[in-house]
Image (cartoon, grey):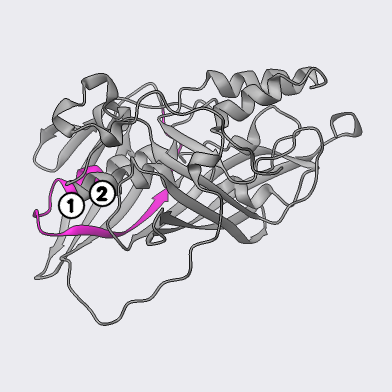
Amino acid sequence: MADSRLTEETPVDAGQQNIGSSVTRTDERSVNTDQIPSHEVTSDLRSVLVTSVLNLEKLDTDLYRGKHHWVPRTQRLFGGQIVGQALVAAAKSVSENVFAHSLHCYFVRAGDPKVPVLYQVDRTRDGRSFSVRSVKAIQHGQPILICQASFHMQQPSPLQHQFTMPTVPPPEDLLTVEELIQQYLSNPNLAENAKQGLNKLLADEVPIEIKPVNPPDFSRRVAMEPKKLFWVRARGHIGEGNMKLHCCVAAYVSDYSFLGTALLPYPNHRAQFSASLDHAMWFHSTFRADHWMLYECDSPWAGGSRGLVQGRLWRQDGVLAASCAQEGVLRVRALTESKL
């Protein structure tokens, strides 16, 4: 069962909250790749999600191998990477004029970060406007993930509506997770165990950039609604013109810190074990995964050592790009008074 990397489940005792109040960013990115023509973007600016993390080697017809893994501190494969790679494999088997509109995945075994993952594609159906693919991600001869993806030829329709995007500060006015951590570490009154946990977070090389809208106050522990908002984009440059690739990157991004939303009302409990059970995603509009998108997450239910989370990815212009849902295992323990 591949697991999600949960930023709320760090060793920092004041975790399990959204990374207090909005913080204004005072500096700018040194390089803005959005303003660089694609032919001038050098290899070191290309997104590692494209060049490595989601890159597959073709072994045979409809058989691929993924060898590059981003491994969280749990030492299990990150579920979002397996979902993203499965969608890459599925997309390689469909025609150029259809695009992913949905995927439904089950995580059935833990992934082993020490060995490659094989992706076996079954061409379930090709119709006039829809194509369906089934993908098995395999390690040690057994499936670790089962995924079904559906692709659709874009068609005009008079039926068009969506929810309204939440009103939040733009990403330019907010700090990244790394900048927030540096700000927290500058507090001389920060507990030593909190410092250790934050430094471990800084040591992680994550291929996506995140700017929380309401960062948590690490100095106190309060119950929060199971909701959070953060801006997110892939690090580096991907470019436009390949919607299939942007959907694969968004599938990777959608699993990041997703299940932890269900832990926000329980500041006096720590997750001993957490893992994604299934993951579904629906793609609504065109977007670029290397541009800022607002990830709106909420958890309508938790019980029976499981939690349900839902998410919406919004473009900066207010268009709903994608919707997500996931259920996962959440086994928790109560914190002792000394750790509160």
Which quadrant does the C terminus fall into? top right
Q: Tell me if 243 is positioned left or right of 300 in this view.
A: left
- Residue 67, horizontal then vertical, whole percent: 28, 25
- Residue 308, horizontal then vertical, whole percent: 57, 58
The answer to if 41 sits in the magenta stretch is no
The mark nearer the N terminus, 1 or 2, is 1
Vertical relation: 156 (above or below) 247: below
Q: Tell me if 61 is positioned left or right of 323 in this view.
A: left
Image-quadrant location for residue 198: top right
Q: Name the residue that disc number 2 marks.
A: 135
Q: Is any part of residue 216 visible from this angle?
A: yes
Image-quadrant location for residue 236: top left
- Residue 168, horizontal then vertical, whole percent: 56, 54
- Quick one: SS at disc 1? strand
Circles 1 and 2: CB atoms closer than 8 Å: yes
Q: Residue furthest bottom?
A: 158
- Quick one: SS at disc 2? strand
Give whichever of 16, 208 is nearer the camera.
208
Q: Tell me if 288 is positioned left or right of 29 in this view.
A: left
Give whichever of 181, 123 is nearer the camera.
181
The answer to if 110 sits in the magenta stretch is yes
Q: Name the residue that disc number 1 marks.
A: 122
Q: Residue at x 41, y 53 (%)?
A: 316
Alpha-carbon span between mark 1 and mark 2: 6 Å
Image-quadrant location for residue 155: bottom left
Q: Residue at x 31, y 32 (%)?
A: 49
Q: Amino acid at mark 2?
A: Val
The boundaries of the magenta stretch are 88-112
Q: Amino acid at mark 1?
A: Asp
